[in-house]
């Protein structure tokens, strides 16, 4: 099975993985940000994992909205573009795809550094870490990247190295439904794959806005699950980007991606 087909299995599987992790926290004790499991800036990567990731991904900055950012991704020149998915030894590599919602957020931040300059930023569902990297490049005072996959955390550190940045803190705990953190800005892309997960995000993000006056930016290329959710009526379109041809081909013909500002009319 070519990775192009496998990629769509990942797209469907991502929703199940996120749902399982989120539901496992429902009703459980809240987590404060300082208690989350972090990769620190000085964390040493497992040499075998590093070697595997470096061997089986390609460093690229082309075909995406942010040529300023170099990333390790799965491309047609990689072995696992063609290999059977069950031969990949780690969790499904969602992080190895630069999803269009994340591309739009990263492009917007790079073009409008005032959005993050001097501010604290949480990148939720960070994946490859591109949006967190864009925030650091644009002068954010504090950046925390979050992804439930520890391999994603390792990949983010490699991507920081590629862009000559000191690694930012990375938490690999599920933090949806946790206590509100004191963040100036939360960014999240390509996270609305299921109505129940979207409901949880909706509630959690509203809590941050109500308690901390946090600003929230969402990146999404207009998938049905996102457009049909009630949260869509509380979004304000910030900017729309035409996707490069390479990204269109990887995403079943999606042609553009939008950055939305989440401004709920009733945060209670």
Image (cartoon, helix red, strand yellow):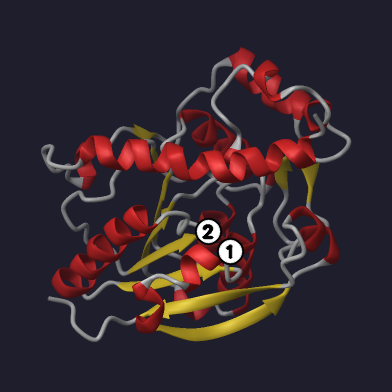
**Element under disc 1:** helix
At 44% from the left and 39% from the top, the residue drawn is 16
Point out the image quarter for the C terminus: bottom left
**Residue 48 badge:** none
The picture places residue 12, in percent across and down from the top left corner, at 56, 44
Label 2 CA crowd tier, 10 Å (few <14, some 14–19, many 20+): many
Using the image as rendered, state which of residue 26 and residue 135 is in the foreground: 26
Q: Is residue 109 above or below residue 59?
A: below
> Does the image show residue 74?
no
Using the image as rendered, state which of residue 23 and residue 79 is in the foreground: 23
The answer to whether residue 261 is left or right of residue 105 is: left
The answer to whether residue 85 is left or right of residue 38 is: right
Q: Are marks 2 and 1 in contact (CB under 8 Å)?
A: yes
Which residue in the protein does label 2 denote? 190
At 72% from the left and 57% from the top, the residue drawn is 251
**Element under disc 2:** loop
Which residue in the protein does label 1 denote? 101
Counting every numbered tag in the picture gives 2
At 35% from the left and 36% from the top, the residue drawn is 20
The picture places residue 143, in percent across and down from the top left corner, at 41, 55
Point out the image quarter for the N terminus: top right
Mark 2 to mark 1 CA distance (whole Å): 5 Å
Q: Earlier in the sequence, mark 2 or mark 1?
A: 1
Residue 84 lies in quadrant: top right
At 22% from the left and 57% from the top, the residue drawn is 181
Label 1 CA crowd tier, 10 Å (few <14, some 14–19, many 20+): many
Residue 120 lies in quadrant: bottom left
- Seen from this angle, which residue lies furthest top? 48
């Amino acid at each position: 099975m070519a990775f192009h087909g496998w990629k769509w299995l990942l797209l469907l599987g991502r929703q199940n993985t996120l749902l399982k992790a989120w539901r496992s926290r429902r009703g459980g004790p809240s987590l404060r940000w300082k208690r989350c499991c972090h990769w620190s800036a000085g964390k040493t990567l497992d040499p075998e994992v590093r070697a595997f990731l470096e061997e089986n991904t390609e460093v690229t900055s082309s075909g995406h909205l942010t040529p300023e950012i170099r990333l390790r991704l799965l491309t047609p020149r990689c072995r696992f573009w063609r290999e059977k998915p069950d031969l990949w030894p780690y969790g499904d590599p969602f992080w190895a795809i630069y999803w269009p919602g994340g591309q739009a957020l990263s492009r917007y931040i790079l073009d409008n550094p005032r959005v993050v300059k001097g501010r604290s930023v949480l990148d939720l569902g960070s994946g490859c870490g591109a949006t967190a990297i864009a925030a650091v490049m644009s002068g954010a005072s504090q950046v925390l990247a979050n992804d439930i996959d520890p391999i994603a955390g390792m990949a983010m550190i490699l991507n920081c190295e590629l862009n000559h940045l000191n690694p930012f803190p990375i938490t690999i705990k599920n933090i949806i439904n946790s206590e509100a953190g004191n963040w100036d800005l939360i960014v999240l892309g390509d996270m609305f794959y299921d109505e129940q997960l979207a409901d949880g995000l909706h509630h959690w993000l509203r809590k941050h806005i109500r308690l901390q006056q946090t600003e929230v930016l969402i990146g999404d290329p207009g998938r049905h699950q996102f457009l049909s959710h009630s949260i869509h009526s509380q979004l304000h379109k910030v900017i729309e980007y035409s996707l490069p041809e390479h990204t269109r081909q990887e995403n079943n013909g999606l042609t553009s991606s939008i950055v939305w500002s989440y401004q709920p009319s009733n945060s209670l």
